[in-house]
Amino acid sequence: MIAFPWLTLLTIVPVAGALILLALSGQNKNAVRWTALAFSLAAFVLTLILWRHFDSSSGSLQFQERHAWISYLSVEYHVGIDGLGLLMLLLSSIVVPIAIVASWQIQQRVALYYSLVLILQACLFGTFTALNFFHWFIYWELSLVPAFFLIRLWGGPRRTRAATQFLVYMMVGSIALLLAFLAIFLAVKQFDFIDLAALAQNGQLIPDVVDKLAWHRFAPEHMALVLFIGAFLGFAVKVPLFPFHTWLPSAYCEAPTGTTILLTGAMSKMGVYGFLRILLPIFGAQMQVVLTPLLWLAVATIVLSAYAALAQKDLKRIFAYSSINHLGYCLLGIFVIVKFTGGDAALTAEKYAAMNGVFLQMFNHGLTAATLFWFVAMLEKRSGGLRGLDDFGGLRKVAPVFTGLMGIALFSSLGLPGLNGFIGEFLIFKGSFPLVTWATSLAVIGLLVTAILVLGILQRVFSGPLNERWIRLPDLTAGERIVLAPTIGMMFALGLYPQLLLGTINNTVIQMVQHLKF
Amino acid sequence: MLAWTIYISFLGAAAQLLLPRGSVALARILALLTALVGFGITLTYFLLHRTGEMLTVARVPWIPPLGIEYRLAADGISLTLLLLTGIIAITGILFSWNIADRAKEFFAFYLLLIGAVYGVFLSYDLLLLFVFYELVIVPKYFLIAIWGSTRREYGAMKLALYSFAGSAMVFIGLIAAYVAAGAKTASLGDLAQFPFSLHFQMLAFPMVFAGFAVLAGMWPLHTWAPTGHVAAPTAASMLLAGVVMKLGAYGCLRVAMTLFPLGLGPWSFHVMGLGSWRDVFALLAVIGIVYGALVALVQKDFKFVIGYSSVSHMGFILLGLMTLNQIGISGAVLQMFSHGILAGLLFAVVGRMVYARTHTRDLAALGPMNLNKVIPFAAVTFVIAGMASMGLPGFSGFVAELMILIGVWRAYPLFAVCAGFGLIVGVVYIWRALQKAFFAEAEVESAPPNPPLPPISYPERIGAMILMGASVLIGLYPQALLNVIVPALNSPLFEGLRKGSWQ
């Protein structure tokens, strides 16, 4: 146990960076860009230090800091990470530098842009480490502000509408979430996730709530369901789950590509993280009650978004829908875990597999989607903003390295064995299939459609006759190759040696699954 | 030493009049120094006495035959509001840095108003309190009538008449209480101990409460507020919304509720589901919250949006008071502070940063000016102030409104739902104003304004930083104020209230 407040320091670093950038706003743009990159890399180094000191043999919370804060509301400052938290910190600190590099060509109000990016990073760190609803919610809500302005001020032609739609969806979800937690707080005077989870596991939470709120007209089960749905909405919109996803394609598409990287690579994980950290331990029993509809939603998310991606012409939109599809697998993996409770050893092993798969999938999707959007950004830079599926053709001939590396990222997204995307999806399917066969079988359609999608992109953009217009399209520069190399390398490393992350998360997974009893 | 906040302000006001003709810069600096000293005194006192209990500051016989004393005292609630007054006074002067027309008189009236406000928050003798309370009305009338804008005579007169009507009700109630208690003392503590008959309290409570609530902008007696705020010059609207409206809420809690706690008890009958004055005022507060928010939603004038939002937020304070539980009332006091800061900030953006430059407050006319590029600092400030005002976590409004809502939920679950609806409308109207005023995308990129708008000056920047900092500080560490508010509410003064239906 290290007494040093590492996690707080980690959250402060990007905030400090943002303030310094604002002070630099008059300076030359490159100074601003490099400063932003330096701060994001500093945060990355800090997470590496955390990882090094993290005790993988334990699935419990580590690096905890707990201080009294607002005693009248029983609010404490409580942070801590387990394998899940650490994984998310790693992901965010990888995605943010990528986003910063991918936004290099932004010319207007550079300092403001990068300080918003760093504030968003601080909110991400805060969300992934906070264990008390109060400050967790501060980060959760506050993350909307930089995201909104990044879309609103630097976005594409239809940015106003996209940003507004994004904000309204998120706000509605957050308010539902807030109300659910306020109701719980009124009854049990607790804001702490860990304490609430303990109450829920003992079966005390819901009787307490029903008792104190004195809504006797409501049967306890119904009361519990209402609270669950409130909290569920908040996370389902964020991930997003069908049918709450309609904000996503336009937001991802209109946002400047660097911001899209942040949205898909890191922010969407906030929703999945919420499912794992909050919904599953606190509302596991309610999830079990409505499991069948939830599974249908997950399957619909997976299959419909894959088909929707197939119907798009704009690369950004394609990857946006494909993101929904990939996160759908995570939700499928989470939902199947509550299907059976109890100690059957064979089923428990499947649950471990599914949950490990969910964790890995979160990380892998973050990495892969960020890289894919990064390629889109580089393509846009070369084509002057064009990114339609039919605008190109035969790029393989003029930009072979670009084609090769983007091909790797595309195959990783498809889940080709040997690349990082494979192992997460494989574990989810392996675990889910014995638990809920029908839903898993239907979800396989999503995999097939994604395969068609990826091959289609390769064919229409990179193969075929060369579009004369792009005869002078430059290939990746040496600089771009160097900054891309670690990302692509990581895809291979994780694909070939998933133990790298599995070793860190496995004990957390075991502990999480074992704690689920209702 | 706390008493010097009053004297310093009055002395500062007098000194303004002695300044040589035409010394505008000197007048500003003198005013700023006066405000700084006043705030410094309060802050020192606050840091030295963080118990929240009622401590007497000054005590001199005044009219001995009538038992009336010049007696000043402060507890945690007064301290909270004194701090607020100090902050608003300083920032108000920073945002009036551009006043050149009759600057000496402006600052003299301004400091007079500040001194009187300090006086109200410090008075322990009811007659003294009333004297200061009346004294507030005079300078605010002149501030609006002389330095105001749109329909200033109308706004000033309306505000003065409403204030006088409210004070008249308060005065009758107070005199009646003084006489009923034997005309021996007007001290708040003694009168609060006096066992007035139930019948008397049932009559006196609504009169005094409503009298003070006029100034707190309680629906339907709120109509002076939006017109007054809009007509007032920036610093005066900051003071009006930030501090003067708090005087009303403070009076409701400090005078009406402590003197006549039985007046809050149930009648023996129900009228339309309402069974006590408490129910009546709670209902009016909720109507104020929702009505204020909905009206703010359809305003065309930027300043009216903020004016009506004040009505809505003040409704939360009154509703919090009517919960009669500790969390609700302490939330209400915290909201007095929070709304004071935020209303000040919002009026500063609208009145000083935007209107003083563009000379229009029409949202439709502001849109094409592309203000987020022209004066980005104003846009950023409004975004932050708006977030705080809509109750985003991390800012003072969130904690205060959260505590009030928790209290209301225990007392009136249905009203909590309505107030929650008001909050959601609050998000929408701030949002709408933000979009229309700062981020409206012009169809055609309009030419930059000619002559170009002057950039945001340093006094404005510093003022905005102070207010934003205060809101974030209290949002992240509300304990700083709650530690003095809660013990104050547990002091003997509020015993009658606690004995009643305190939960």
Image (tube, helix red, strand yellow):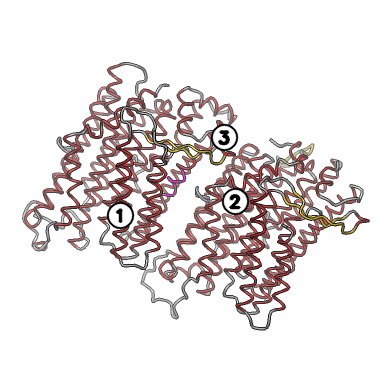
Compare residues B350 and A108 and report the one nearer the observer: A108
Which three-letter amino acid code belongs to the residue tagged 2? Answer: Val
Which three-letter amino acid code belongs to the residue tagged 3? Answer: Leu
Taking the view exactly as shown, the residue that stands out farthest to the top is A344
Q: Distance between the residues labelled 3 and 1?
A: 44 Å
Whether residue A271 appears in magenta in the rendering, the answer is no
Disc 1: CA contacts within 10 A as few (<14), some (14-19) or many (>=20): some
Place of residue B492 in the rendered image (x, y in percent of width and height, measured from the top left): 76, 41
Place of residue A51 in the rendered image (x, y in percent of width and height, measured from the top left): 30, 38
Tag 3's secondary structure?
helix
Q: Mark 3 points at which residue?
A: A186
Q: Mark 2 points at which residue?
A: B290
Tag 2's secondary structure?
helix
Q: What stretch is highlighted in magenta?
A: A137-142
Q: Distance between the residues labelled 2 and 1?
A: 48 Å
Observer able to see residue A132: yes
Mark 3 or 1: the one toward you: 1
Disc 3: CA contacts within 10 A as few (<14), some (14-19) or many (>=20): some
Observer able to see residue B150: no
Q: Distance between the residues labelled 3 and 2?
A: 23 Å
Main secondary structure type of the part rendered in magenta: helix
Place of residue A187 in the rendered image (x, y in percent of width and height, measured from the top left): 56, 31
Q: Mark 1 points at which residue?
A: A38
Disc 2: CA contacts within 10 A as few (<14), some (14-19) or many (>=20): many
Mark 3 or 2: the one toward you: 3
Contact check, label 3 and label 1, Cβ < 8 Å: no
Q: Mark 1 lies on which chain?
A: A
Q: Which quarter of the rendering shows the C terminus of chain B?
A: top right
Q: Which chain carries label 3?
A: A
Q: Which quarter of the rendering shows the N terminus of chain B?
A: bottom right
